[in-house]
């Protein structure tokens, strides 16, 4: 059964196999797994379920393509990415409908994700010709130093389910720009959008007579069985992973054996600070965006709201009014603001966090329920007077729940913001430049939004500190992750 929003043309041409060596085909033994629509629970497609052996064949293909792709002119690599950007942008509605079908987010958000995701291809098309080196006379004057860059080699890209186009292009774009072939392991909940992106790039490579084995895709329902052997294979030179800190730790431990280059974009627990002099209207607007993008299922979602005592009650009330006015439902339905969570397990987890908070005395200002009917929905929820030790404050919520904690002053807000192992994103609202600078100096996060509820941009370095990760994606820094520096003394 297919979702009603997917056009017959899209369904007819949608790849559901594995992409290895430039060809789409079945997994070993013809194994498949089901991909479901989170708004209904209905199965959308059966997708090839790659085994460890399929993963090895994908790496064979990437290793074979490594020499020719490295030798391709940077301008040629750039043009492939630029053409893929154009093709995806021209098919925004098709991509958006697929994102909504497998991931659940409302169509308007899915379109925004297509624009955001395609932009990584355009940005890295522009960066592909800028892998600069340097030449200088050594300080002692006896010789020259030549520093140049070369691609790190075949890369394993493990992507999450929450932004199925943007998280794929954020890795594929810089890898291809740098000259690295890739094996992509998309999330089993939302592999289809990533597979369609790969098909666009594959056909662009084929049309230009370039090696199509540069991009390989191995969807699987048993990720550990596939990634473990790949991380132990000495032809693999790079791992880029986006997902939970727990899985990231396991992959890092496996990658240690080969001393692999690793980029890890891991869990977050973003604090959202509303300081005493904040513009409350702006803070509430920013909070809605920072909390509810993709129903709160983002690593950079605001997770806990630390609001100055003088504003906390009013902030929570206004936020609750805004949340209560939003329409929850299937993302493909007109007028829907908040879509489903990815599956029933996610709803159970979020409900457990809300129960824990109310059990510790938090007041439920709005939400706190699962709407009747099929699909994995949870109402946008605001909790006031939350115990700073509540699980919803300590753990990554990944759902539409905003716990508000009142704080006495900036010192307390910053101390609580930093009282976590995570350090991905943070947000602060203040009308004082001094306070804004203090937050940007002292809050332990890789990305900080000042009077903004959104930090993501293809041209900016995205990544975290502490247990939120290693390395950066996006911007100039994203290309570095796929390049080796070689120093030649002349
Ligand atoms: C994420 O949730 O991991 C990424 C979100 C973004 O790029 O904005």
Image: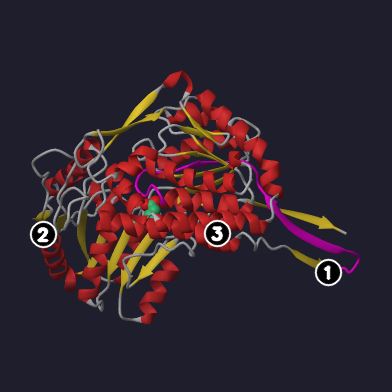
Label 1 or label 2, whichever comes before in sequence order: 1
Q: Which mark is residue 324?
A: 2
- Magenta segment includes 476: no
Q: How far apart are marks 3 and 2 (CA)?
A: 40 Å
| Residue 219, quarter of the rendered image | top left
Pointer 2 residue Cβ closer than 8 Å to ligand 1: no
Label 3 or label 1, whichever comes before in sequence order: 3
Q: Please provide percent x and percent y for residue 220.
A: 42, 30
Q: Nearer the viewer, residue 59 or 95?
A: 95
In the displayed orientation, state which residue is furthest to the right. Answer: 142
Residue 98 higher or lower than 434, as above or below = above
Q: Which of marks 1 and 2 is in front?
A: 2
Which residue lies at the image location 36% right of the left edge and 38% below the top edge? 12
Which residue lies at the image location 24% right of the left edge and 78% below the top edge? 279
Q: Which mark is residue 139?
A: 1
Q: Is residue 387 visible?
A: yes
**Secondary structure of residue under mark 2:** helix
Residue numbers of the magenta segment = 140-165
Pointer 3 residue Cβ closer than 8 Å to ligand 1: no
Report the quarter where the C terminus lies: bottom right
**Residue carrying label 3:** 124
Residue 161 higher or lower than 380, as above or below = above
**Secondary structure of residue under mark 3:** helix
Q: Distance between the residues labelled 1 and 2?
A: 66 Å
Q: Please provide percent x and percent y for residue 403.
A: 20, 56
């Amino acid at each position: 059964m297919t979702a009603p929003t997917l056009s017959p043309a899209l369904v007819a041409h949608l790849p559901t196999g594995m992409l290895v060596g430039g060809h789409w085909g079945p997994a070993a033994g013809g194994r498949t797994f089901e991909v479901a629509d989170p708004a209904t629970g209905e199965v959308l497609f059966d997708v090839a379920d790659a085994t460890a052996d399929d993963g090895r064949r994908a790496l064979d293909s990437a290793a074979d393509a490594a020499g020719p792709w490295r030798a391709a002119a940077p301008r040629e690599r750039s043009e492939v990415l630029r053409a893929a950007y154009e093709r995806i942008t021209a098919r925004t509605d098709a991509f958006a409908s697929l994102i909504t079908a497998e991931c659940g987010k409302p169509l308007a958000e899915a379109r925004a994700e297509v624009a955001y995701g395609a932009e990584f291809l355009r940005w890295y098309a522009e960066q592909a010709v800028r892998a600069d080196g340097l030449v200088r006379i050594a300080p002692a004057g006896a010789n020259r130093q030549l520093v140049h860059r070369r691609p790190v080699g075949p890369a394993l890209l493990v992507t999450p389910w929450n932004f199925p186009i943007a998280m794929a292009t954020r890795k594929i774009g810089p890898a291809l720009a740098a000259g690295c072939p890739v094996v992509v392991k998309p999330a089993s909940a939302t592999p289809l959008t990533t597979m369609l992106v790969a098909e666009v790039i594959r056909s662009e490579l084929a049309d230009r007579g370039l090696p199509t084995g540069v991009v390989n895709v191995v969807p699987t329902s048993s990720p550990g069985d596939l990634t473990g052997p790949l991380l132990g294979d000495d032809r693999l030179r790079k791992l880029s992973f986006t997902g939970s800190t727990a899985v990231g730790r396991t992959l890092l431990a496996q990658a240690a054996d080969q001393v692999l280059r690793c980029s890890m974009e891991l869990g977050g627990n973003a604090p959202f600070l509303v300081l005493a002099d904040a513009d409350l209207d702006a803070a509430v607007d920013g909070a809605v965006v920072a909390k509810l993008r993709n129903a709160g299922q983002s690593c950079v979602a605001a997770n806990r709201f630390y609001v100055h005592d003088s504003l906390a009650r009013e902030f929570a009330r206004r936020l609750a009014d805004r949340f209560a006015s939003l329409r929850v439902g299937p993302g493909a339905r007109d007028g829907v603001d908040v879509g489903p969570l990815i599956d029933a397990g996610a709803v159970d987890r979020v409900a457990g966090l809300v129960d824990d908070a109310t059990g510790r005395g938090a007041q439920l200002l709005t939400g706190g329920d699962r709407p009747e009917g099929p699909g994995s929905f949870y109402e946008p929820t605001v909790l006031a007077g939350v115990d700073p030790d509540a699980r919803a404050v300590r753990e990554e919520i990944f759902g539409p729940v905003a716990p508000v904690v009142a704080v006495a002053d900036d010192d307390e807000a910053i101390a609580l913001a930093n009282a976590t192992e995570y350090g991905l994103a943070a947000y602060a609202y203040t009308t004082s430049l001094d306070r804004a600078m203090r937050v940007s100096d002292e809050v332990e996060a890789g990305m900080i939004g000042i009077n903004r509820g959104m930090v993501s941009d293809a041209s900016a370095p995205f990544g975290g500190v502490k247990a939120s990760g290693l390395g950066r994606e996006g911007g100039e820094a994203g290309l570095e992750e796929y390049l080796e520096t070689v120093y030649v003394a002349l």
